Amino acid sequence: MKAPFFSQEELQFIQTHITDDPSKLMLQASRYPHLPITKLVQQIQARQKAQHKLPDWYANPHLIFPANISVEQCSSQQTAQFKASLINGKSLADLTGGMGVDTAYLTQNFQKTFHFEQNQDLQAVVAYNFEQLGLTQVQFIQGNSIDWLTHHSEPETSFSWIYLDPHRRDESGGKVFALSDCEPNVVAHQEVLFKFSENILLKASPMLDLEQSIRELSHIKQIWVISVDNEVKEVLFHLEANFHDAPKITCVALHKNQSTQTLSFFKEEELQTGPNLSQPLRYLYEPNVALLKAGAFKLPCTRYQLHKIAPHSHLYTSDTFQPDFIGRSFEVLAVCKLDKKTILPYITNNQANITIRNFPLTVKQIREKLKIQEGGNSYLFATTDFQGQKIVIVCQKVTS
């Protein structure tokens, strides 16, 4: 497999211009007639997109970044490292290797890893990058991984784990979310996969219908709903051969500047939790999106000794502060009607951050009605309480 490369001068050009505007660099191409400016600018663009998503790769000047679409679709460094904390063993097969970010982190917990990829040019880039990273335990197999498995219907080898991140675009390039619409179709090929491994780790779109996926997939042992800075980024499924019990669901909140928060539960626990309602008390809690995506709407009441503002408002409250809550925590200053004269005494500099939960107006409409600017240290939660009253809860963030 021939490895692509850049000359030392070309690598230096990329690093020198790493923060420059790519479009302006293209206009200046005539200044560098001896350099492949288009190719170098593509590298600069890809690196700029990867700066925050893949900081370690961005900092390595020797790595080559493939097409921008690969950078956009690949896992972030943070989520890849989390996945690597979940699995280990003798051998791993990444059936949808792609740019290789997940492979690079997952392989550190395995003696041998197999990277499958249909795009030969992309796999050549990955092989070159892995050499730079010192990942020598990876074997590259070019082609369709499902075809390869099917042709090895009596496998001489098996894997400790199979990992898949199915392609989530249709033939016209549009995004798809359902597992049965992705390539490969894991729903249709589950039995083939289990011939080669008892354990499958499947990455899915954050937009997928979780209940539908639970119905479609067999042998789900655990589900992880992963958010990064309060945005759902991935849903992971651990499929284990012959597992028939209810899956454990784990909400994972990853943050750049604080420790990871998790909450695990079984769906039956959520179903059996009764309503625990109250008017706003001293503290208000806004759940991390991972809780909402996982369907943990009532469970926080019992896990954190909280009350809900209303059954469908998904805001929680307590008299005693609960520091382990997965989400944002606030101290309540006042509970008001949507009235400027009532609210203004509790905010400074005519600024506030506005959130709506089960409320008929949009944030923009509320801001126009109150004539206040965005920002500041005040937080307004416009919601409906359990008595059906429209209220605005004025808060400030808990600082300790």
Image (cartoon, rainbow, N blue to C red):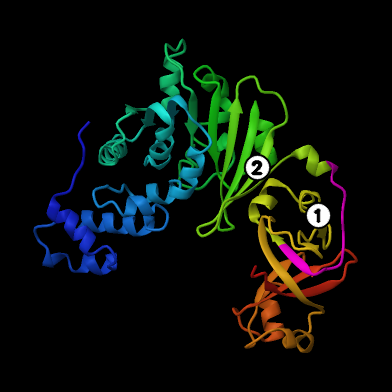
Q: Quadrant of residue 28?
A: bottom left
Image coordinates of residue 41 in percent, x first then y, are 25, 59
Q: Is residue 196 above or below residue 75?
A: above
* The N terminus sits in image quarter: top left
Q: Is residue 107 above or below residue 334?
A: above
- Disc 2 marks a residue whose amino acid type is Thr
Q: Residue furthest front?
A: 400
Q: Which residues are magenta?
A: 272-285
On the image, the x and y values in percent for residue 152 come to 43, 14
Residue 36 shows up from this direction: no
Circle 2 residue:
250
In the depicted structure, whether residue 214 falls above or below residue 365: above
At mark 1, the secondary structure is loop
Q: Residue at x 61, y 41 (%)?
A: 224
Give the quarter of the figure containing the C terminus: bottom right
Q: Residue furthest right?
A: 387
Residue 307 in the image, given as x and y percentages of width and height: 83, 59
Task: Describe residue 5's horizontal placement relative to residue 109 as left or right.
Answer: left
In-front residue for pair 149/176: 149
Q: Is residue 229 left or right of residue 48?
A: right
Q: Would you say residue 278 sits in the magenta stretch?
A: yes
- Secondary structure of the magenta portion, mostly? loop
The Cα–Cα distance between marks 2 and 1, rounded to whole angstroms, is 19 Å
Sort mark 1 into few (<14), some (14-19) or many (20+) by Cα contacts within 10 Å.
some
Residue that carries the numbered disc 1 in the rendered image: 305
